[in-house]
Image: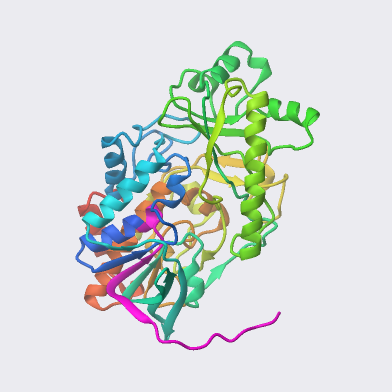
Amino acid sequence: MEKLVEAERDLLVRAKADVMVAGGGVGGVMAAISAARNGAKTVLAERAPFLGAVATMGLPLQGFCGSDGRQVVFGLADEFRRRLIEIGGATDFIPCAMHNPYVIVDTEKVKLICQRMLLEAGVELLLNAPVVAAAVENHALKALIVEGKSGREAISASQFIDCTGDADVVKLSGGRFKFADRSVLQAKTLNVQMAGVDIRAIQKELRDNPESASLYPLLPKNQFVNADRYILVGLPEYIKRAEENDADALWGNVCYITQVNDGCVCLNSVHVSGLNPCDTAQLTQIETTGREQAWLVADFMKKYIPGFENAFVTGTGPWAGIRESRIIEGHDTLTQDDVRAGLVTDSTIALGCYPIDFHTKGTSDGSGTDAKDAIDGLRFEKVPVYGIPYGCLVPRGVENLLVAGRAISATRTAMSSSRVMAQCMAEGEAAGLAASICAQEGCSPEQIDVARLRSMLVDGGVKLSR
């Protein structure tokens, strides 16, 4: 491949901070707020023109509650949830035997509350500012380079937090990570928003004609048919009917989430497999393939699913949702056995509780994820409340960097549980607090007193025990 040598240039140091956060999803937002509230001068850079990332796709906030319905994630994540409710931007917890209780959100109000909380905390915010390079000396980050309308600019800091989801900063700075072969990576999804839906019609169909349709085994029909708001997973009979008549088949389940506004749903039924989301050309193919599939899914819903006859598309997600990409090699690793056993250690900085939720193509991918147990491309397994160790946030290979969100150090199966938004927010709060302590005391994340960090989190309202 032909190469071009880029000329050296002097860069403007736009800001000098104590803590620099890369990525403005809900995990990054909580990380920046946590650092700033603990007295650190904090900068957050986000590639999009808005905040919230995955929380702006129409998905529910999941991972707040265990399978027994008890809330286990509090702290900044719960403040965010409550502030959304105050402005009509979220429901209260909706019971669900399959997913555990969850919260449906208004995507536009998510963006608003994210920026309000950040700016109130005194965080310097840079939107439309993707991180494109890193300045590293002796395995320590000196600055991250962003490139926006002002050109390339440096942001120097004492401590850095990677909340990009794909461990972009870890890669740019020479940290260690793992990446499964693209053929076995979990499927990517571009969500579709539709309005004009009679959300009661499919409930009536399952109640009056139970032989014509079924739900995913973990979703009780008696819970579903009486719910005012719900997540639907199932209806394989309708997909088989469509496959008999139409050339284009969907993956094994219909999936959609009712939204805050009546008659509106978010379809979560697009599945794009076999592509690397950290390769520009393949990510382009993910987006274009996902957009084509999005309209196939919408047409399928209108043609086959009761209640969608008069529905219409109001939008698609800002980008494809990525379930799996780079996973860092940390000083600790969350494993499938830890999750299944409900292990909570004295290094826990956040609690997890969401089920193992692994989206795979086919019956077995040989990746060690027990994909053979999947039903129609989805392996879904309830788990007890478990702890996420601090060391999972500390990548090997870079001295002054922490990671929060999907890319923390975990096995692929464990990550399929810990990747949901409540856990990303809880990890972000812990990472932000840890980074601020390191900046103030001149230590590295590896050297921090974890017992003291835990005590400060608990004092701030975080729950760290079952």
**Residue at x 63%, y 62% (from the top left corner):** 180
Q: Is residue 26 magenta?
A: yes
Q: Picture coordinates of residue 249 (x, y %)? A: 74, 37
Q: What is the quadrant of the N terminus in the image?
A: bottom right
**Residue at x 39%, y 58% (from the top left corner):** 24
Residue 465 shows up from this direction: no
Marker count (numbered):
0
Q: Picture coordinates of residue 360 (x, y %)? A: 65, 47
In the image, taking residue 32 as reference, residue 368 lies left or right, namely: right
Q: Picture coordinates of residue 429 (x, y %)? A: 31, 57
Q: Is residue 55 above or below residue 197?
A: below
Q: Nearer the viewer, residue 449 or 341?
A: 449
Q: Is residue 143 magenta?
A: no
Q: Nearer the viewer, residue 246 or 364?
A: 246
**Residue at x 48%, y 44% (from the top left corner):** 57
Residue 209 shows up from this direction: yes
In the image, taking residue 228 as reference, residue 181 lies left or right, namely: right
Residue 255 falls in image quadrant: top right
Q: Picture coordinates of residue 68 (x, y %)? A: 40, 33
Q: Is residue 239 above or below residue 210?
A: below
Q: Is residue 41 above or below residue 54?
A: below
Q: Nearer the viewer, residue 54 or 437?
A: 54
Query: Which residues make up the magenta segment?
Result: 1-28
**Residue at x 42%, y 43% (from the top left corner):** 63
Q: Nearer the viewer, residue 429 or 310?
A: 310
In the image, taking residue 197 as reference, residue 69 lies left or right, namely: left
Taking the view exactly as shown, the residue that stands out farthest to the front is 149
Q: What is the quadrant of the C terminus in the image?
A: top left
